[in-house]
Image (spheres, rainbow, N blue to C red):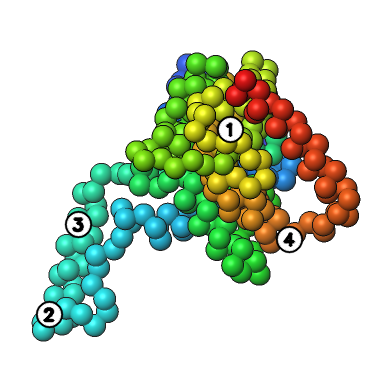
Amino acid sequence: MKTHIEQAKKSWRVPNKSGPPPRQSPFIRFGDAGIWVTCHKNQEKKCIGEVRDLFEEYSEAISPETGSNKPLKGEGSENGDEDDIEREIRQEVSDIHKPTQRTPFEAIFLEVPCLVFFRINNNSIDPVAFVRKIMEDAAADPSKKRTRCTQRLVPSTLVGHASEEGLERTAKEVLAPHFHAENQQSKKFAIRPTIRNHTQLKRDTIIKKVASMVGDQHSVDLKNYDALILVDILKNVVGISVVGREYDRLKRFNLQEIFEPTPQQPKEQKQEGLQQESTAGATAEQSARD
């Protein structure tokens, strides 16, 4: 009588190499809108899980496409339970025939330590407003900790090619409603680039190019800005968004800092660090005016 091991060996077959290729992971595309998410080291997969749950919950609350037309309990016709049963049957049949819809958020594993990207597939969701809502709610009640390994949420209104031409094209589209609207008032602005795994565009080049796209009508103010331009570059893609004064108040959109604030450093050291950052940024941004 053959043992279980012998039967298992006999039934095992070499995998068919001529079959379909393995499914590729999704990737960031030019024209995408989305949210960069940073997390603790080696926690990328856990981060994707908890952030997906968080995003889907918020999207159901704010997106008009997820609104429900179901009658409230107690409402209905005089026929009572009989009509309720017929209504439920019709609803189930209708749901079966509905076309499959893409999820509003698509997680993209970037194979970059401590970083993932969530593509937004729902045009009714604005990345900046969406992240702001999450951060405002977290700041209103930090005791309700919703995430454990997630850190920053960085919105990108539009993703383009990380070249000088691509940067200019992307910035032109993103900046227009904030700086070039009809009857536009002068604003104070700042620019904060974040560069990962990219060598073509240097920090100073990015700041000069984006500042030139803002225009002379507006002035640079690194501390008391009205609008902050976030430029995130990873490899060959660049994402740009414009946030407001709430960005620094909400810990630079860092959930970890909202839930578990880092002890403040001595005032002298903090002022020294801010002075170094301000000097470097001011030199580059003012050169764009020359």
Identified by mark 3, the residue type is Val
Q: Report crowding for label 2: few under 14, some 14 to 19, many 20 or more residues within 10 A (C-alpha).
A: few
Residue corresponding to mark 2: 77
Q: Amino acid at mark 1?
A: Val
Q: In the rendered structure, which amino acid carries the disc numbered 4?
A: Glu
Which-is-in-front pick, marks 2 and 3? 2
- Tag 4 residue: 260
Q: Is residue 107 left or right of residue 81?
A: right
Residue 231, numbered circle: 1
Disc 1 or 4, which lies upstream in sequence? 1
Picture quadrant where residue 40 is located: top right
The relative height of residue 246 versus residue 178 in the rendered view (above or below) is below
**Which residue type carries mark 2?**
Ser
Observer-nearest residue: 48 or 202?
Answer: 202
Residue 277: image quadrant is top right
Contact flag, marks 1 and 4 (Cβ < 8 Å): no
Identify the residue under disc 3.
93
Residue shown at the point (64%, 56%) measured from the top left = 249
